[in-house]
Structure formats: C-alpha cells, structure tokens
Amino acid sequence: MFRVNWRVPVGPFQMKGLVGLDVVLDIENHYVDEFPYLPRHARDVLQRHVDAGKLGVKSGQGFYKYT
C-alpha cells in the first residue's frame, strides 16, 4: 500500500534493505541520542537482524531474501 499510495518504486523495508540495516540502526541510535523518548521496538528489531548478520542486500538477507 505504501508504494501505491506514495507512488514510489520501493517501500520502507525495501529501502532499509538497500541502505543496509546496520546503517539504518546507526541512524536510529543517533535519533535516540537526540530524542530519548522514542520507543525502542524498531531499534530492537533492527539490532536482532544486525546481530544475526542480516544486513539487507549486502548480506543477501534482511527483511527480505536477496538471492
């Protein structure tokens, strides 16, 4: 729905996979340094993926499998 409604070629999870989940996690951690009241859930999910080596396109797997 995101792609259709916003008329963009990739959705937010695909974009995160292209950028790299480790990079996205670094950005999220910077945000929380500036805004400590932000919820943790998204960072926790990203951290689990990064810890498992699921970094997105560069590792072949993230939220999607890239094979």
Image (cartoon, rainbow, N blue to C red):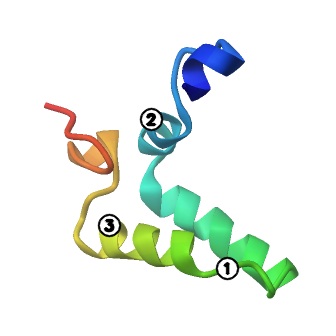
Tag 1, which secondary structure?
Answer: loop
Kind of residue sitting beneath label 1: Pro
Would residue 57 appear left or right of 40 to someone viewing this image? left
Residue at image position (52%, 36%) is 15
Q: Position of residue 21 (x, y in %)?
A: 44, 56
Mark 1–mark 2 Cα distance, whole angstroms, equals 22 Å
Q: Position of residue 64 (x, y in %)?
A: 27, 41
Q: Position of residue 54 (x, y in %)?
A: 26, 58
Q: From the image, tell me which residue sits under label 3.
A: 49
Label whose residue precedes the other's in the sequence (1 or 2): 2
Q: From the image, tell me which residue sits under label 2.
A: 14
Kind of residue sitting beneath label 3: His
Label whose residue precedes the other's in the sequence (2 or 3): 2
Mark 2–mark 3 Cα distance, whole angstroms, equals 14 Å
Q: Residues within 10 Å of mark 1 (few under 14, many from 20)?
A: few
Label whose residue precedes the other's in the sequence (3 or 1): 1
Would residue 51 appear left or right of 7 to someone viewing this image? left
Circle 3/circle 1 CB separation < 8 Å: no
Kind of residue sitting beneath label 2: Gln
Q: Position of residue 28 (x, y in %)?
A: 65, 68
Tag 2, which secondary structure?
Answer: helix
